[in-house]
Image (tube, rainbow, N blue to C red):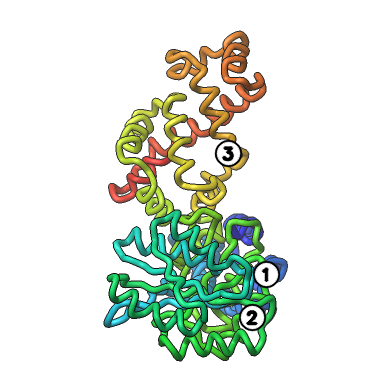
Amino acid sequence: MLNQLQEGFGKIVKTLRGEGKITESNIRDSMRQVRRVLLEADVNYKVVKEFTNRVQEKAIGADVAKSLKPGQIIVKIINDELKKLLGRNTYRMKTANTPPTIIMLVGLQGCGKTTLSAKLAKKLKSEGHSPLLVPVDVYRPAAVEQLQVLGKSINIPVFAEKSKVKGRVKAAVPYARKNNNDYLIIDTAGRLHIDDTMMKELLMIQKLVNPNNIIFVADGLTGQDAVNTAQVFDKELKFDSIVLTKMDSDTKGGAALSIVETTGKPISYLSIGERLDEIEVFHPDRMANRILGMGDIVSLVEQVQATVDEEAAAKLEKSILKQKFTLDDYLLQLRQMKKMGPLENILGMMPGAIKAKIKNVNIDEREIARMEAIILSMTKKERIKPDIIKGSHRKRIARGSGNQISDVNRLLNQYKQVAKMTKQLGKMKLPKNLSALKMGF
């Protein structure tokens, strides 16, 4: 997520931190680099100009504290301005005085509204709510059926009675009240481009149910186009917040840095993967830290706490604290990581220094299955003391797991990299409320 921005800013931050003295000349040089990184990420050119001007103005007039190096001051200014650019505060959805709270999702066809409907419903259910899904896209083939399948997979009801859009939306509210559904999520129809027919229907739905939250859903891959579309939707509907989808891909990130500034509306969620649990609340301060390579330990801890088995976590934490990380522990760790989703998303939350140490570890679900087979083909002694695994051992393990010797070698090399990182974590004096970090890592 936002790889291009992270890599670009990472280089700039590294250069700035190495500066022994900050002058107007090297501030301007740094701002030229910042400008280039932002423009290459498809950030609106007006946003780029205003952002760099603000940073440069504050940097030139900054007083350098004795406890900080000059470069650290500039990095802090960039970080502060990024937070402002991303929206300052975490957005919280409005709730109805009398249930149900109505959420209306709007956006172009293909932006991911239907999947997002199910993701929001699952998240709300995990928080103790009882959501109801209402599909009103009666134009796209199988759109209603798609949401019904998604709803069934997460055991959430889908209201698809009445064939007409107006009748279905109107009937959904009393149905939700009758069945004690405190949230109602309306998945509206989209088009390949904005047209009057679509907008009139959206305005009709808005007038009919007066939603508490209108959320504009934007495809994070479309960059500046998403910003332009958002402005048109906001002019007509006055939406409340924005959700960026497809943020698990190698997206440039321009939409995230432009859309808040140009629309004046906050980002409420990010959709970060295909699985229905891969959605996260958008925190501007945490995202700014991620972009600058400072990591997002708080989000990482929250994700670990939500997905990691407590008993397994306690066992891993004990091993890490004792700095005795075995291949059995590694297997347990891999299984926990599988629950948390793609490794790339996890690494994106980690500080650059730690992430750099394991950047070559490439693990997906299929690879985890292969690694599990390899580890389970080892003897108990080999799993406790991997150093005894020599050539003949590796040949036997490869044959027993149905893999090549090169696969066994790769697993052992990856294990060594992770073992080094866990040894570092074992030495870290983390506060008690961050001990969950050690559970999954």
Amino acid type at mark 2: Thr
- 328 vs 78: above or below: above
Image label count: 3
Amino acid type at mark 3: Ile
Of callouts 1 and 3, the N-terminal one: 1
For the residue labelled by badge 1, is the local secondary structure a helix, a strand or a loop? helix
Of callouts 3 and 2, the N-terminal one: 2
Q: Nearer the viewer, mark 3 or mark 2?
A: 2
The tag on residue 363 is: 3
Q: Position of residue 371 (x, y in %)?
A: 55, 28
Relative to the observer, which residue lies in front, 383 or 55? 383
- Distance from Cα at disc 1 to Cα at disc 3: 28 Å
Q: Position of residue 114 (x, y in %)?
A: 53, 67
Residue drawn at (58%, 44%) of the image:
356
Relative to the observer, which residue lies in front, 31 or 229? 229
Q: Position of residue 130 (x, y in %)?
A: 32, 66
Instruction: Count neighbours of disc 1 (C-alpha within 10 A) and say few if under 14, some if 14 to 19, many if 20 or more.
Output: some
Residue drawn at (60%, 22%) of the image:
408
Q: Quadrant of residue 263?
A: bottom right
Residue bearing mark 2:
229
For the residue labelled by badge 3, is the local secondary structure a helix, a strand or a loop? loop
Is label 2 in contact with label 1 (beta carbons under 8 Å)? yes
Residue bearing mark 1:
222
Amino acid type at mark 1: Thr
Is label 3 in contact with label 2 (beta carbons under 8 Å)? no
